[in-house]
């Protein structure tokens, strides 16, 4: 009969630990990320655009569509990198099912003020909807003198319902 020495116990324990780490790594690398929000409900755009007071309301992102089975509040979120001239502010409104944008009805209306540098801005709206499919779209407009300007860079939006 062979005796297990202290050094062989260490090698056995080390080999077992390496095997456990390899198994854990295999499990972790084979797991796919969760698709929490369907493509029709979320997306991002990388291009930039300028906003002046004369342009009025401009679509911040494409519309997002969400379908719910009962009357409820849906949560619509938006985020963007924005730069605004001094003395102006970028206002946010939400269009529901192709309507004109509603400013300050579903959530904050002041999306961005002047800062020294471009900053990421984020907010959300709670929109009461009935059962069925609803389309929401964020819009922005610049409030300020006619010579003022804002620039919108990378931006994303999403709409979610029935999350719990």
Image (cartoon, grey):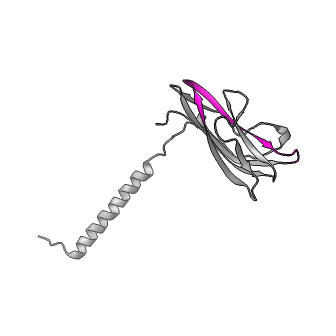
Q: Is residue 29 above or below residue 39?
A: below
Q: Residue 139: within the magenta?
A: yes
Q: Residue 62: within the magenta?
A: no
Secondary structure that dominates the magenta span: strand
Q: Residue furthest right?
A: 147
Give the image quarter of residue 7: bottom left
Query: Where residue 50 sits in the image (x, y, percent)?
Result: 80, 45
Magenta range is 126-147
In the figure, is residue 3 to the left or right of 111?
Answer: left
Q: Is residue 134 above or below residue 29?
A: above
In the figure, is residue 136 to the left or right of 10?
Answer: right
Task: Please give the name of the residue rendered at 37% of the width and 59% of the height, measured from the top-left corner.
Answer: 22
Return the residue nearer the eye: 46 or 131. 131
Return the residue nearer the eye: 120 or 124. 124
Give the image quarter of residue 24: bottom left
Task: Please give the name of the residue rendered at 23% of the width and 73% of the height, measured from the top-left corner.
Answer: 8
Q: Residue furthest left?
A: 1
Task: Please give the name of the residue rendered at 64% of the width and 35% of the height, measured from the top-left corner.
Answer: 106
In the figure, is residue 95 to the left or right of 150?
Answer: left
Query: Where residue 15 sits in the image (x, y, percent)?
Result: 30, 66
Query: Where residue 127 sits in the image (x, y, percent)?
Result: 60, 33
Q: How many marks?
A: 0
Location of the N terminus (image quadrant): bottom left
Query: Where residue 135 sits in the image (x, y, percent)?
Result: 63, 29
In the figure, is residue 30 to the left or right of 132?
Answer: left
Task: Please give the name of the residue rendered at 66% of the width and 26% of the height, measured from the top-left corner.
Answer: 97
Q: Is residue 32 above or below residue 67?
A: below
């Amino acid at each position: 009969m062979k005796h297990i020495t202290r050094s062989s116990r260490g090698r056995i324990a080390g080999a077992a630990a390496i095997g456990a780490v390899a198994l854990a790594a295999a499990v972790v690398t084979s797991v796919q990320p969760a698709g929490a929000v369907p493509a029709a409900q979320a997306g991002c755009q990388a291009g930039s655009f300028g906003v002046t007071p004369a342009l009025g309301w401009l679509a911040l992102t494409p519309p997002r569509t969400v379908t719910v089975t009962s009357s409820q509040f849906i949560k619509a979120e938006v985020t963007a990198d924005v730069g605004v001239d001094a003395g102006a502010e970028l206002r946010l409104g939400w269009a529901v099912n192709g309507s004109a944008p509603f400013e300050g009805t579903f959530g904050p209306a002041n999306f961005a003020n002047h800062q020294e540098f471009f900053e990421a801005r984020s907010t959300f709206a709670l929109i009461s909807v009935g059962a069925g499919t609803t389309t929401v779209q964020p819009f922005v407009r610049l409030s300020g003198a006619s010579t003022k300007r804002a620039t919108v860079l990378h931006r994303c939006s999403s709409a979610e319902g029935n999350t719990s």
